[in-house]
Amino acid sequence: MPALAENRRARFDYEIVATYMAGIELKGFEVKAVKSGKMGIAGTFVVPQENELYLLNADIPPYQPNNTPEGYDQKRSRRLLLNKKEINEIKAKIKGDRLTIVPIKVYTKRGFIKIEIALVRGKKKYDKRDTIKKRDTKREMDRSLRKN
């Protein structure tokens, strides 16, 4: 499952508590654009509305700009497809634990476009510094092992 779009910044800014796989309700020309790798999910978030979850601020530019319908909004909100049980579970965790829902990556599974969303808790500044320090020490260790 190669990633079509990835939100690498989310892994740095947030502590991931739980992940879920969801489908996305897209139009035909949007599917072609996503499969060609034109989707951007940086700065995107998920919001519960009534008994559904919506992906907000995801950028899907038109696959063929000349054949795109007039008035197409590439940053429109898109409905996420999950079971009622999963939606209720996510909504309960958000209220109780003060968590946020952030998309992590978009990929294909058996021809369908799926999005991995995560319940996240914001990291403090010292946690981010600690993450950077661990990454740098790991990189240095790998370099020294390759030299020998």
Image (tube, helix red, strand yellow):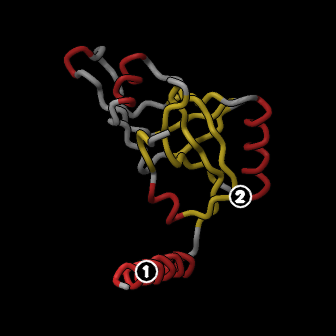
Tell me the kind of residue under disc 1. Asp
Tell me the kind of residue under disc 2. Arg
Closer to the N terminus: mark 2 or mark 1? Answer: 2
Under circle 1, the secondary element is: helix
Under circle 2, the secondary element is: loop
User: Could you tell me which residue is drawn at 30 percent across and 14 percent down?
Assistant: 69
Which of the 4 image quadrants contains residue 29? top left
User: Could you tell me which residue is drawn at 58 percent across and 29 percent down?
Assistant: 23
Which of the 4 image quadrants contains residue 136? bottom left
Vertical comparison of 20 with 49: above or below:
below
Pick out the residue farthest to the left: 66
User: Could you tell me which residue is drawn at 49 percent across and 80 percent down?
Assistant: 129
Q: Residues within 10 Å of mark 2 (few under 14, many from 20)?
A: few
**Front residue of 97 and 50:** 97
Q: Residue 117, percent across and down?
A: 59, 44
Left or right: where 10 falls relative to 37: right
Residue 98 disc label? 2
Pick out the residue farthest to the front: 148
Residue 124 disc label? none
Q: Residue 94, percent across and down?
A: 72, 50
Q: In which quarter of the image is the C terminus?
A: bottom left
User: Could you tell me which residue is drawn at 44 percent across and 48 percent down?
Assistant: 6
Left or right: where 106 falls relative to 29: right
Q: Residue 57, percent across and down?
A: 44, 40
Mark closer to the observer (2, 1)? 1
**Front residue of 9 and 73:** 9
Q: Identify residue for label 1.
A: 136
